[in-house]
Image: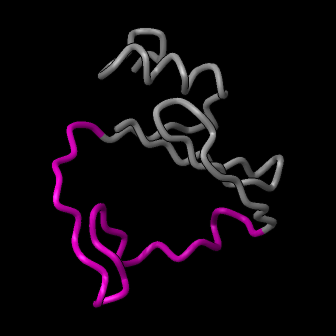
Amino acid sequence: THVALVLEPGSNRIALYINGALAASVANSDALANLRDVDNWLGRSHVSSDPELSASLSELRVYGRALTTQELATSHTAGPDPAFLGP
């Protein structure tokens, strides 16, 4: 499953894409610098009763800008390390 979280400070929105399609979006007027950045895990919750992820992660990408909807759809279709996204 291709999962992407897009933080768009300019439009005050956080969007979740699954397999290249928008799955959910919420308003967020807080600055990214104000997000709590401790205890950040992939596959683990802050809630002890939540089960841990029973899967493997093959890739994690972090970009300095919000990818467009088209870029996310192309990324999903292209698979790992699509050349169009660059280094």
The correct choice, above or below, for 46 with respect to 74 in the image is below
Residue drawn at (37%, 83%) of the image: 46
Residue drawn at (38%, 38%) of the image: 61
The N terminus: image quadrant = top left
The C terminus: image quadrant = top left
Q: Residue furthest bottom?
A: 48
The secondary structure that most of the magenta stretch takes on is loop
> Is residue 79 rendered magenta in the image?
no
Q: Nearer the viewer, residue 43 or 11?
A: 43
Left or right placement of residue 8 versus residue 54 in this view: right
The correct choice, above or below, for 6 with respect to 59 in the image is below
Residue drawn at (26%, 37%) of the image: 59
Q: Nearer the viewer, residue 28 or 18?
A: 18
Where residue 41 sits, quadrant-wise, is bottom left
Q: Nearer the viewer, residue 13 or 51?
A: 51
Q: Residue furthest top?
A: 83
Left or right placement of residue 50 versus residue 27 in this view: left
Residue drawn at (29%, 90%) of the image: 48
Residue 73, image x and y in percent? 54, 22
Colouring style: one colour
Residue 56, image x and y in percent? 16, 48
**Which portion, as a residue range, is magenta?**
30-59
Where residue 81 sits, quadrant-wise, is top left
Left or right placement of residue 10 versus residue 78 in this view: right
Residue 82, image x and y in percent? 38, 15
The correct choice, above or below, for 27 with respect to 64 in the image is below
> Is residue 31 rendered magenta in the image?
yes
Residue 42, image x and y in percent? 30, 61
The correct choice, above or below, for 50 with respect to 81 in the image is below
